[in-house]
Amino acid sequence: MLNRKQPPPIQDAAGMELLLPPYEHFTLKNGTPVYTIEAGSQEVVQIELLFYAGLWYEDFPLQASTTNFLLKNGTRKKTSFQLNEQVEFYGAYLNRGCFNDVANITLHCLNKHLTALLPILSEVLTESVFPEDELAIYRNNQLQRLNINLKKCDFVANRLMDVYLYGEQHPYGRYSTAEAYETITREQLVAFYERYYVNGSCMIMVSGRLPADLRLQLEACFGDLPMKGKLPDERWHSLLPAQQHTYRIVNDEQGIQGAIRLARPAPNRKHPDFIGMQMLNDILGGYFSSRLMSNIREDKGYTYGIHSYLHSHLHEGSWHINTEVGRQFCEAAVTEINKELILLCEEKVSKEELDNVRNYMLGGLMGDLDGPFQIMARWKTYLLNELPEHYFDESIETIRAMTPQQLQDLSVRYLSPKAFYELVVI
Amino acid sequence: MIHFERFLLDNGLRVLVHEDHDTPMAVVNVMYDVGARDEHPDRTGFAHLFEHLMFGGSKNIPDYDEPMQRAGGENNAYTTNDLTNYYAQLPAKNIETAFWLESDRMLELAFTKKSLNVQRKVVCEEFKEHYLNKPYGDIWHRMRNMCYQVHPYKWMTIGQELSHVEKASMDEVQSFFYKHYRPVNAILVVAGAVKTEEVKHLVNKWFGGIPSGEKYIRQLPAEPVQTAPRHTDVHANVPANALIMAWHMDARLEPGYYAADLITEILGGGNSARLYQALVKEQKIFSALEVHHFGSTDKGLLALESRLVDGVNHNDARAALEMELIKLVNKGITSEELEKVKNKTESMIVFEDMSLTNRAASLAHYELLEDASLMNTELERYRRVTVDDIVSTGKNIFREENSNTMFYHAGKSSHA
């Protein structure tokens, strides 16, 4: 007779072998570094060109994101439509993204089409023209989208929290305004493009099933361009964090939920505490059985979800707790969140809870390395943060060896409620 | 080519195994043949509420998540109008933990009062977060009610109204479970670093003893063919006018489905798609637009959701949109344009199949629809679509009497 109360034996994920496959590396004639991962069984390839062209580098609000968005909206030879049509004819995806520190342009395609598509990428990176008409359409549509977002309590809360943490003038704290959309000019985009893309610092990452002559193809498309490898960073921005720590805002009188945000400055990935902080974050609000989910969702039913996050930017970091809860539960939920923070500072986590989160994290790491793109994504984080090659292995060791005492020390260092900004937007 | 083997337990549970030894992981995916369309009109939102309750403990195991995490696993679930799917990914060496957990909750749930009380509240907050406390959040609630008169696609998976979920009783929860969550109504897919023989042994061990249950025979009212255009106006406190349209289209396995899917792509897939180019970029009438279809098992909807540039009125926007649809069905498309959307479909399928979790869910979904091997051959059905098919399917879909239109007006709300 099967005994269903008896769990089957398990192997600790902590004891399983975990390998991050290494990348290959070479440098193009112009100094641009290339990293490659050859893996996977599908005949696909992803190529990402990463530029130090994020918000950190802009002289005017929205300059970085608008330049990035309009990169593929017209070159000297092709209209926006022609560019997109050519890419889409091959069933490929040409995406771009702009972040706090970096910006990218990424191509995904079946590898049989790579040779036909690479020249489009280099065209976009050398001959984009940023037509006035494209800028006007983008401006109008973004203004409308901003007006809609400003009705949402979560959107408003996220913006305010970044301002409290970094200050309105800091690239990590700055937010989009109608005025900025109205005043951004084509000349500002062209200047940013010339400096941070055409003559900028680039890093190329290629993953998937790679053609044998990849290096030749990359040299032919990108090797003679004026862009180069990483340049010394000449920018610096000073922080201006808010003095006041507690805020209650009504954005929508009719609102039936409130967005609760707690956040504090925290070290970024380069800090030796970071891996321990990630473990502690999982315990606090990083997975389904976290303290916050167990209490505020699974016990009280105040919310559909509550999560905590570590944000690691290249120059700063922060620790966040986010949730949307029924309007009448907002204050009760804030009280419970603070209770959970205090509890982690005052009491050690049990060995069972620690083992649980340890196995969850290591199993998750194993699962995350599902395919070439995910492997490359991990290396990208390490490369951007200039972490040592054995960082992955060291992280695993740190996770395996973490003790309840170390977690409590980290809690005392980082999770004291008084260090957090606390905001509710209805 | 996705390889798999299939076997049937004596109690009717269908099992598919997809071996992939490039990964150290395994996925255990259980799909139940029940979705929001199987709910009683006075108890909508039930299939989805039930999905929440499936994490509230089972007969012999007080908590599902903790042992799963302890085994290095992650898991989640989703409910659609057609089906409910539960999946877990964990190191293959610990796969028996997933069988133990999944089989116990197929055997019998704990049905605790606490779990029901809390999850009712959680689902209400989910309802508020996604549909009530968000500009334009009520669009599909209203559209579904207009497009479907009798078929249960009338309501969204979250439910027709909050009160249905609030009133769910323990008796109803239990009878729902024993009606739908039985081996005979489920498909189990195991994928990853596993051996079929071992899976057979373990599946028999854990699932073999669960009572088969009665096969659920679905008898849903068919939606009558729409014979006149429908229209509704909504006034809400939002900053921009929106135009939403939906047309009835073929069911997931009917021949017209494939042409309709390609039409969706021709009109709205990507920045070179027709409507984006004509209406957003050239005519500057729409500020954002999206064309999609529901891919539903029964007859579905092809839909356009759009926002209008400030100052543009709904009638002008609709007229401009209709010009583009007329162009499509009168002038047809070039073979290059057709080739483009077929290429996109091919690459979409390849990219989707990269993840083990997706492969497992797709196998289960195709098996539920008809046969898992369709996963390997469906691209052929797309390849066979001709320019003429696009035109005739387009003509049939975009008939005036087949249309459902919503003018969503910016301004102050006209109701509480």
Image (cartoon, coloured by chain):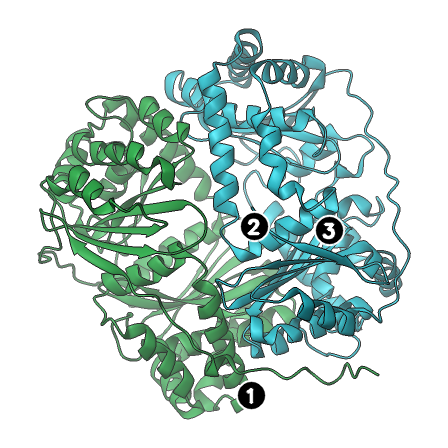
Chain colours: A green, B cyan
From the viewer's perspective, is B343 left or right of B371?
left
Q: Is residue A157 visible?
A: yes
The residue shown at (19%, 43%) is A216
Residues beneath discs 2 and 1 located on the same chain: yes
The residue shown at (61%, 55%) is B360
**Image mark 2: chain:** A
The relative height of residue B42 versus residue B415 in the rendered view (above or below) is below
Is label 1 in contact with label 3 (beta carbons under 8 Å)? no
Name the one closer to the observer, A296 or A56.
A56
Q: According to the image, label 3 marks what residue? A: B162
**Which amino acid is tagged 1?**
Glu
Q: Secondary structure at mark 1?
A: helix
Q: According to the image, label 1 marks what residue? A: A352
Dot 3 crowding, Cα within 10 Å, few <14, some 14–19, many 20+ = some
Cα distance between the residues tagged 2 and 1: 41 Å
Quarter of the image that includes the N terminus of chain A? bottom right
Q: According to the image, label 2 marks what residue? A: A255
> Considering only order in the chain, which callout, 1 or 2, is on the residue closer to the N terminus?
2
Q: Is residue B56 visible?
A: no
Residues beneath discs 1 and 3 located on the same chain: no
Q: Position of residue B398 (x, y in %)?
A: 64, 16
